[in-house]
Image (cartoon, coloured by chain):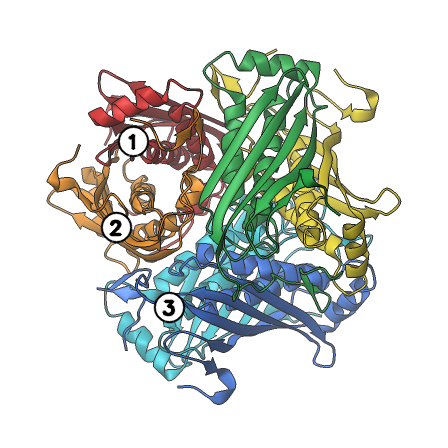
Chain colours: A red, B orange, C yellow, D green, E cyan, F blue
């Protein structure tokens, strides 16, 4: 199997010039595993007008738009929709992030959805680190994509 | 416990104007769990001149420098040293990333080290996603920090 | 009336994936009200080769291209034309800025025109603040837009 | 009166290398004048979990950090504190924004405070423009600064 | 001959809204002339796992994506392919950089190819400057372009 | 001779945390060799209010501030002064660019001065390319630096 991002042993931005533009979506998720201290701080912080999770949510939206700046071989894409959810799963003592990105383009938006999740998760960490430095960001992963020549893909249907 | 990033219920960038500048370091890590296909592609790709893991490593260094742009309440800091390692742990079928960031500043560089790891991990995903979309980024976490009023912290010494 | 930028109470970047691309323009304006000192400095400064208003004009053009980076819920758009005028209205003792932005896209460029005006106005302030800190930026407002499903809009025709 | 941003008729970034670092603050404000439709939309939007004004507030904080990227002759400064308030003044049918920025540096943060206000105001416009395009951003102005050789300045004490 | 980037004496971003999107490519080159010390350092550095020229190559790819941010009157374009080669020409004691950029757009990608070359060349300088500050970047020039109304152009066919 | 930007074969951002901050300057230059057509266009363009060379000059100042974003292993530095000159040397049928950058920091600003020159030169090319695509950017080189442990360096004094 060849890595498409390499050509004659050199990284490059894959040429998609002649591919057709098709509708594409990608959905990813990430988790921030909280400590007890962080959970308490988060619940306390949520009482006021400022909701730390909304800060993370916005950071995720902005992060998706910076993907091609951050990931060297990503194509700059005209994103046409970004949704990010950031929710406290209190029982599981964790924050769950889910991001869906849409475009009509020659290539997919998997990296944009994953970057949105990662940036939102880092922002959750930033806001809670005064309470506890031991938080862990985990399971940053693609859940589903649609569009493109390779067609739909879903994590829960297994995968090669 | 109050969230320092909130004041009267509003997020803000914490005032550190009158804190003293001290030497600070932070070290973080992240993992990318590979599938069999991704491992094969990575080993094949590494044969040529272009090493996918070096792409990720550089992306991590650049990512650290973008932290204050990405994380809304982070202070812009004059980073004075960034090291990122990206290594294949073949037995464990995963890539391990470790980043250490240094500064002399009023506040710490934990977020910079974590952002370096997250961006490097996303870049690994990007380069291997043609082989397998099922890779998972996990355990993005702080390992150690030094400097600042709260002093040193190490994950392996347990933590409140 | 619902705010389109909110969905289930959460901000999001509105999904425009399936909208058609149409020609769109937007024109906005802004004013910088000068003090007597600032006016004198501006007229003096204009004598040399360097024209402070041209600095502001270029800053406006560059600012329009940064809109999606600055305004969290704005779509990144392929701008196809940007014009910015920055003119001293000596009688009125103010600087007037007018920006027109064009694209062929699924959504409009009102924010790009307004951002161009705001950044140009801030730049005028920056260049004159050594003469006088009391300058005021005012009437940053949309004058006209064309294209899109809602059709043309002009400020001077009143508005719903 | 010479414009300090010009030297031999050419714009330049003023040399502050040998100035001493001192504590500095700047506070600025801006207003978004609402229409009736926009006010209704804003009050409706505020009912849910997502508060449009918090989106603007965060955009303002991030905007302050981008000042040296946007304003050509501004120095990049190590900002040490940013506070932005965005409040609905219902009686006056307007949104008021106030931003305070702090640093310890060779030059002041007036532009950072003004940029925070302008970006927050543009974001308010963006979120309400579906309700009404006729909103006007006005009175983007410096209220107060402290620090630096020229000492404190306050708008309400009059000024040339 | 008029400069298209100027209109009524003011710089502007040329209006290409109604031009058709066509396939376009541009190829540019640049050289970094080495000193003896720099050549030795480069050859020594190339022995390990880290190849300085790959750092430059990636910087070039990322640089191409920043073109519209850097060059005031450039249009933001949806780049669809970027290739950068960075090779030591040992006999000539220099590094040669070649970049090809592709898009399907209303205007060409000459500036993107040239910017990729310039940023890669600056990066080569940065990595070798500890060995020798006397390196010279030279012949940053367009080699070829295709697409657009003006059709193909090649340096070696002569040109006015 | 080792490359300081590599450590154990991996590129890194050199640790300068414990170096002292000293005053530093760097001056660099670059040339854009014009064709006859470009010279005519430039002289014609200069007649109006808009001076193409001032556009390039500002782009150079802004470019210096983006150096650490563009050059992977560069430290982000608090630049305290930037001057850029862009002048037509009519006899020699070329444009000469000279940039001087200043800081008080742990490491030098050679890359910032060179980046300013390169970005200004690319901007000159951009503005003249409608007249002639055959322009060549040449001799992007450091002229002088002061400060730092290695002390002053001047090109004209020869160098190993």
Q: Are marks 3 and 1 on the same chain?
A: no
* Residue E78 place in picture, x, y as percent: 54, 43
* Residue B127 place in picture, x, y as percent: 32, 45
Q: Is residue C100 above or below residue A81?
A: below
Q: Quadrant of residue A88?
A: top left
* Residue F93 place in picture, x, y as percent: 71, 77
Q: Residue furthest right?
A: C91
Task: Single out the mark in the foreground, 1 or 2.
Answer: 2
Q: Confirm or deny contact between disc 2 and disc 3 (CB under 8 A).
A: no
Circle 2: element type: loop
Q: Nearer the viewer, residue E155 or C128?
A: C128
Residue drawn at (41%, 35%) of the image: A112
At label 2, counting other C-alpha atoms closer than 10 Å, the crowd grade (few under 14, some 14-19, many 20 or more) is many
The residue to which callout 2 is attached is: B147
Q: Is residue A17 visible?
A: no
What is the count of numbered marks? 3
Task: Single out the mark in the foreground, 3 or 1.
Answer: 3
Q: Are marks 1 and 2 on the same chain?
A: no
Q: Quadrant of residue C139?
A: top right
Residue drawn at (61%, 27%) of the image: D96
Q: Is residue D2 above or below residue A57?
A: below
* Residue A85 place in picture, x, y as percent: 39, 22
The residue to which callout 1 is attached is: A141
């Amino acid at each position: 199997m060849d890595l498409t991002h390499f050509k004659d042993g050199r990284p490059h931005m894959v040429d998609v010039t002649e591919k057709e533009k098709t509708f594409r979506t990608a959905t990813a998720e990430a988790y921030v595993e909280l400590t007890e201290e962080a959970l308490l701080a988060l619940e306390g912080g949520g009482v006021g007008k400022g909701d730390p999770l909304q800060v993370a949510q916005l950071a995720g939206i902005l992060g998706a738009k910076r993907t091609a700046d951050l990931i060297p071989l990503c194509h700059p894409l005209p994103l046409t929709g970004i949704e990010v959810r950031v929710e406290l799963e209190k029982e599981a003592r964790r924050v769950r992030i889910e991001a869906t990105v849409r475009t009509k383009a020659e290539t997919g938006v998997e990296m944009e959805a994953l970057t949105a999740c990662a940036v939102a998760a880092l922002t959750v960490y930033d806001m809670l680190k005064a309470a506890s430095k031991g938080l862990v960001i985990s399971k940053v992963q693609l859940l589903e994509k649609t569009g493109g020549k390779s067609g739909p893909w879903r994590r829960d249907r297994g995968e090669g």
